[in-house]
Image: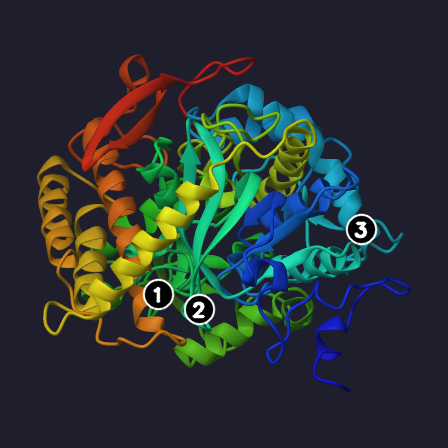
Amino acid sequence: MNRRTFIKLGVAAGATVAAGAYFSWWGENIPATVRDGSALYDVLIIGSGGGGMRAALEATKQKGLKVAVMTKMVPTRSATTMAQGGINGAARTTDSKDSPEAHAFDTVKGADYLCDQDAVEYFTERAPEILFELDYYGIAFNRQEDGRLHQRKMGGSTYARAAYSADISGHAVQHTMFEQCLKNNIDFISECQLLEIVADNGKVSGVIAIDMRSGNIISIPAKTVIVATGGYGRAYWVRTSNPYSSTGDGIAACVNVGIPFKDPEMVQFHPTGLASNGVLMSESARSEGAYLINKDGERFMARYAPQAMELGPRDLVCQSVEKEILAGRGIGEGLNAAVYLDFRHIPKERIMERLFQVKQLALQFEGVDLFEQPVPIRGTCHYSMGGVDVIDYKTCATKIPGLFAAGECSCISVHGANRLGANSLTEVLVFGKTAGAGAADYAKGAGYEGNKEKLQAAVERWNKKFTETTGRSSGPSVAVIRDKMALTMWNNAGIFRNESALNQGLRDIDGLQEEYNKCFIGDTSRTCNTAFMNYIELGNLLVVSKAIIMGAIARKESRGSHSRTDFPKRDDQKFLQHTLISKEGDTFKTEYRPVAITKFKPVERKY
């Protein structure tokens, strides 16, 4: 096997793959045209998760367009690979009573009515088609005896509608999308960190990035840019199920170019993160019958959601876990406090067939054999309902012509104040496809209207910034600032919030921003300078953290994942609207936009 062959394993039989289309540890990470500055892409996607790759696939359907995916990692190491439970779609292969309208209602109700219902209808109508596309691409879905997809019921859903591949559904999606991208000769620009989106006269010019291997600052001109960089869970650093790459890069870049950050305060805390480190125990565990119990062995969800029990929506279940701990019915203290997830009554064969990764994680990180003992769990930051403000759900366009967004970094909004389990993979695929088509249509009818001189000026500015920041000989370290940020966010803008804590959190983040402006990086080299990458990511997280807290302070109600102890009721009269945080210079401002309501009038949620 030669050094480039290994990455081709799994490519569809008979596929023709261009030699430069795929990444190798030993080969070039950047196409030659990007390295020499001659590249001009019709569609440039930032982010190689399920949304980014699905966008790339769709864009290539417009013949003659030059399409590329840029990623700061290896293309197959996005957060998509960590999604476990399944992919929602009313395909009705297991439950014939399901329908896109039922899926829409569950999504709207789960979102505590903060989502835009026209976008939700678009989303749920296209979800079954996505499942059948994945089946055609060859994903190894779990199946029924008749060969049709088996679908399981996830939290907040009325029917069984999540198709799945054991408890590694995201991994299956990611590698399948990568295979299809290789088949279609899509360029990959790997190990390049996004630094800036450049726009001129209100139109996209391209992006500035740093080649992490060489340390060179590069510009990539593009007619259109799709931001698909994932979420921002690492704002909570030590209590999150997100990978270390989830640092809000695309959101911060869009905020810096004038696009609002929509609903930033809507951060989802998953109820079942491992007690020791926040690593996710999939919702599929509860779908397959695992119980939540307190230290007394009581299934406490009977107190909070007597009908849905463990399969209530994530916000409700997570807040219930926290209430048990606060009431003294948990185990441990402080950040190590927890309750239990109990598998002991589930047949071992079912666990090994459908939850083998869950079993492995419990053993690896908690030292617990879930066949014999319950697993200690607690809420963990899991998902970003907020994101880049998308103003047209039928194209995924933003307010800047030529700039699109899809996946977890975007807010369209179909998740509102709380995302349902198994809606995330569906969203990245439905709206990745939509964004790819929208960007391709825009690019096909447009010449390059960007400003290459402005791109070059940005390169020179970033080179100066690199020299200045890495050349500091003293100052607070990136790691210390990051740890302070994580503690501030968990303590002041976590599962439960109040005015006093949020105001303190805002003061803390502003203070950390001042420290960041003079922080010490400690590495002046250009080659593989991961310290500088950590510095860039921390800057993005501080922008995101400030927006989260500002949105949470302004929203004086409790809705979905946003739980204010000083405003415990939902207030539709004042806050049935989206938060928009914008940045002008160094000043952040808060505005609102009404929620789009079609069929489902807001009522009290009961489960």
**In the figure, residue 11 lies in which quadrant?**
bottom right
What's the residue type where badge 2 is placed? Met
Residues tagged 1 and 2 counted as in contact (Cβ below 8 A): yes
- Identify the element where label 1 is drawn: helix
Residues tagged 1 and 3 counted as in contact (Cβ below 8 A): no
* Horizontal side, residue 98 vs residue 605: left or right: right
Locate residue 257, reporting x and y percent. 36, 36
Q: Which residue is mark 2?
A: 212
Numbered badge on residue 270: none
Q: Which residue is mark 1?
A: 533
Residue lying at the far bottom of the rendered structure: 1
Locate residue 300, reporting x and y percent. 37, 51
Q: Label 1: how many residues lie within 10 Å, few (<14), some (14-19) or many (20+)?
A: some
Q: Label 3: how many residues lie within 10 Å, few (<14), some (14-19) or many (20+)?
A: few
What's the residue type where badge 3 is placed? Asp
> Above or below — where is 393 with respect to 149?
above
Mark 1 or mark 3: whose residue is earlier in sequence: 3
Q: Which residue is mark 3?
A: 135
C-alpha distance separating marks 1 and 2 = 8 Å
Color style of the picture? rainbow
The residue sitting at 74% across, 44% down in the picture is 60
Tell me how many marks there are. Answer: 3
Q: Label 2: how many residues lie within 10 Å, few (<14), some (14-19) or many (20+)?
A: many
Is residue 177 visible in this depiction of the protein? yes
C-alpha distance separating marks 1 and 3 = 38 Å
What's the residue type where badge 1 is placed? Met
